Amino acid sequence: MIKYVHRKDLDLDKYNFCIENSIQTRVYAFSWYLDVVANHWDVLVLDDYEAVMPIPWNKKYGLKYVTQPYFCQQLGVFSLDNLSKNQQASFLTKIPKKYLKVTLSLNTENYIFSKTSKRLNYFLNIPDAYKQLYKNFSKGRKHAIKVGEKQGLELNNTSVNHLLEIHNKHYQFQIPEDMLLKLITIAKIKNCIKIIGVFKDDILLGGAIFIVSKSRIIYLFSVFTDKGRKVQASSFLISSILKDNKNVGKVLDFEGGNIQNIGKFYRSFGAEEEHYTVFNRTFYKAF
């Protein structure tokens, strides 16, 4: 039986155990993560937390709606054992009708249902030997990495504030900075984050934030200066991360690829495509 459980009534130990040990496990669904990125969230729970589906929601003009939070690419159904397509579909039908609009990204292990639209993600299995990866890089990507090496680029830890300074100076789109800062604070406590900068002659040219989970290294956020782009800092960074994480049995999750040029960049590392879907539902309420 699937029941709707409010966040305040959750058995957090059972909920997080299900997320950690589920077939579809994603860091986005842990309670500590959702507490940061979602204004409100509740959960659909199967029996004794054998499967769960977090429902992040918001309210505007007194109307409630389900919406995917920032820094949270995939949610959906998480289960300890395999569920049939009908069982997974039951979760979607159980989303209460009090939510007049639902826009919710499922995960790549969930089935594809009607009322969903496809989204593209790229991932790369990290083998034991970097050479295995390197031979699958495109010719252009190999050249870009060599450019970075010849420029004497170096990796070192940096701060999110330094990366945000680059973002605010070199990028036009806005992000919820306070949310990102809070997420990083909690992720540091959980010991699951890396903030890496690319330097040339001690000058920061850009960098990235990686969230490290049980099976995935998620490329959560990255920024580069104009000079960083010219000297191929992003290619150098990703290549170095792959080198440093061989023998750990993880996947580098690029967390994106719908934009054509970005997808092409990820493919140049030999990354594979995977599809997740966005479930959409709208109810019109008469007043």
Image (tube, rainbow, N blue to C red):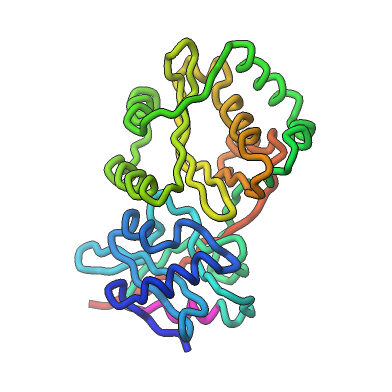
Q: Is residue 230 above or below residue 222?
A: above
Q: Which residues are magenta?
A: 89-97
In the image, what residue occupies the spot 61% across and 76% down?
81
Of residue 102 and residue 237, the one placed in the foreground of this image is 237
Question: Does the magenta run of residues contain 147?
Answer: no
Of residue 1 and residue 48, the one placed in the foreground of this image is 48
Residue 180 pos. (x, y %): 34, 43
Classify the position of the C terminus by image quarter.
Answer: bottom left
Q: Is residue 36 above or below residue 1?
A: above
In the image, what residue occupies the spot 47% across and 70% down?
17
Residue sitting at the far left: 61
Of residue 159 and residue 148, the one placed in the foreground of this image is 159
Answer left or right for 59 relative to 118. left
Answer left or right for 95 relative to 83. left
Residue 94 pos. (x, y %): 44, 81
Q: Is residue 267 above or below residue 11?
A: above
Question: Does the magenta run of residues contain 90?
Answer: yes
Of residue 188 and residue 95, the one placed in the foreground of this image is 188
Quadrant assignment, res 151: top right
Residue sitting at the far bottom: 1
Q: Is residue 157 above or below residue 258?
A: above
In the image, what residue occupies the spot 34% across and 23% down?
169
Quadrant assignment, res 102: bottom left
Residue 171 pos. (x, y %): 39, 28
Tag count in the figure?
0
Residue 2 pos. (x, y %): 45, 85
